[in-house]
Amino acid sequence: MNRLTLLIWLLIASVPFLPVPDFWITQANYIGLYALVVVGLVLLTGIGGLTSFGQAAFVGIGAYATAVLTTQYGFSPWLTLLAGLLITGGSAYIIGAITLRMSGHYLPLATIAWSIALYYLFGSVEGLGKYDGIANLPSIPLFGWDLDNGRAMYWLIWACLAIGCWAMLNLLNSRPGRAIRALKGGVQMAESMGVNTARMKILIFVIAALFASVSGWLFAHLQRAINPTPFGLTFSLEYVIMLVVGGIGSVWGAILGAGVVKLLQDQLQVLMPALFGTAGNFEWLVFGLILILLLRFAPDGMWPWITRLLPRKTPPPLATAPALPRRAPTAKGTALLDVQGVRKTFGGLVAVDNVSFQVKAGEVVGLIGPNGAGKSTTFNLVTGLLHANDGTVSFMGQRIETQTSRDIAAMGVARTFQHVKLIPNMTVLDNVALGAHLRADVGVVSATLHTDRRTEASILQEAAHALKRVGLEEHMYTEAGNLALGQQRLLEIARALCCDPVLLLLDEPAAGLRAFEKEALAQLLSSLRDEGMGILIVEHDMEFVMQLTDHIVVMVFGQKIAEGPPATIQTNPAVLEAYLGGVE
Ligand SMILES: Nc1ncnc2c1ncn2[C@@H]1O[C@H](COP(=O)(O)OP(=O)(O)OP(=O)(O)O)[C@@H](O)[C@H]1O
């Protein structure tokens, strides 16, 4: 934690000692409660890209769990916090497992549906007090002290928020955190790096729900009485507005958003009825307008404005750490990839038709052909992104044509993409570190508690080494989206190297590179070949391919029309006719 952050937290902790009126303590309490929910939403929506309009329902589960168990069964509020977390976590897991398979606008619609369902459940069940709710909740005891007023609850609320922010930041800057951030870059890339995207989605859904549940527990014991109203759809929408206002990708933006919306709401609730001359929820008019303007002109919310004013942090030097375990080297000449008679159709189109070829360790094989020949489709068949209709694909003697891209990555096959797939707002170093996902075993708990320091240092060291190999070390802390296209391709190669692959598949790696960068890339690939790596490369730059490869496979209209060493391919009449436009 830097000095400025520490100073701000100390200032926040000292507020109840200062002559601050109770009104402002109450405001601060609600801001803290809302911010807890929004920090969860930052992870779910801002980072993970999953929109939820149902967080208030999870706040409700936390609140009702403690209300029922303390008032009807006499449990301690601390026990009911755990019970609430268990119930919320369980419900979120079940709801998530059902709804997170949906994509596009179906997911937000589903979250609205279960949010409404839970709201009516709270209001209809006799044991939950129906719409009157449950009253007379006990206060929370803490080391013999009764947190029975707003000032006392202030510390607990803001301590929970501080712990939540600390845990969330730890998580985001870790191996699972990078995997979560990769979700927004598309499932294909993340799965190719070995990330179990379905599990990650459920995980962030459950974590966001747990943040909401803690907020509900605190809310219930602050109010000492609850009813269904604060757990309905309107409040869920308010949380989303706070997220957008503060900045959807930032933990600190969550607190800012909660603060700005809460304070503005209070002012508007007084001002707007006076302006219209009648009572009503006119503040929503303003919120709607603010939301539209923000989405149009500042979709990243207000936090990026503030960060521009803050002093730039110099990243600390990377810690030295033990190297990550590497695969045993494969002897040159070992058969790595064996593609036999693969066929892939898209409806009536035969994209790949009965294609066979092999790649050995210590060999660079070029896969060439005009546009639409089926090269990328063949790549996708080898890496498990697509499954062949016919034929077999084997890697080191093991059949892989029905395996997932995650399993194939785990076996030692790494790839780059024709259309670069990276996480633009993550640093180059973190993007590359994602490649080492399968080489370390840091779980969410360890990441959250920051007990993963050693492994994290090893991962970053590995990523830095890969960046050095591709000549991008000076851009380590640049946001990946700010790199030129050619450099982004080099980043993808570094990420693939970070997987410690046996077989490297490169889809048009030289596209967008300048002459000296191509030269450096050719040298790098040659040295990887000398180390025993097998390389399959799709490339349109013929000079590059002819100089680098040991063997070339030529495809036209989905079929293999020739294969052999570059010198033979260059003079093959069928290739010249079909691919290069015929013999002069
Ligand atoms: N998901 C898909 N659905 C339908 N058709 C597809 C799909 N993917 C590829 N195709 C078609 O399959 C054929 C082969 O495409 P592919 O991208 O594999 O060719 P390519 O050789 O990699 O071409 P390029 O060099 O332009 O990238 C093309 O006609 C393409 O339009």
Image (spheres, rainbow, N blue to C red):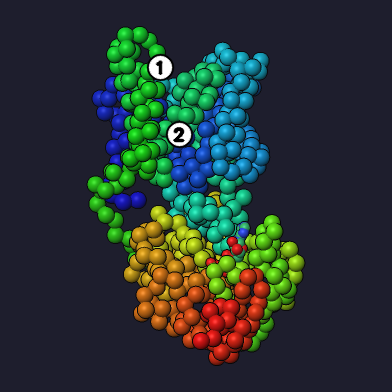
Place of residue 309 in the rendered image (x, y in percent of width and height, measured from the top left)? 24, 47
Q: Is residue 342 above or below residue 73?
A: below
Secondary structure under the numbered disc 1 in the rendered image: loop
| Residue 517 quadrant | bottom left
Query: From the viewer's perspective, is 388 left or right of 295?
Result: right
Q: Residue furthest front?
A: 584
Q: Residue furthest top?
A: 278
Quadrant holding ligand 1?
bottom right
* Mark 2 lies on residue: 240
Secondary structure under the numbered disc 2 in the rendered image: helix
- Taking the spot 47% from the left edge, 72% from the top edge, the residue there is 509
Residue 573 vs residue 230, the one in the foreground: 573
Place of residue 34 in the rendered image (x, y in percent of width and height, measured from the top left)? 43, 31
Measure the alpha-carbon separation of dots 1 and 2.
18 Å
**Amino acid type assigned to the residue bearing label 1 in the image:** Asn
| Residue 92 quadrant | top right
Residue 50 vs residue 311, the one in the foreground: 50
- Taking the spot 56% from the left edge, 78% from the top edge, the residue there is 579
Query: From the viewer's perspective, is 317 left or right of 556?
Result: left
> Which mark is on residue 281?
1
Q: Earlier in the sequence, mark 1 or mark 2?
A: 2
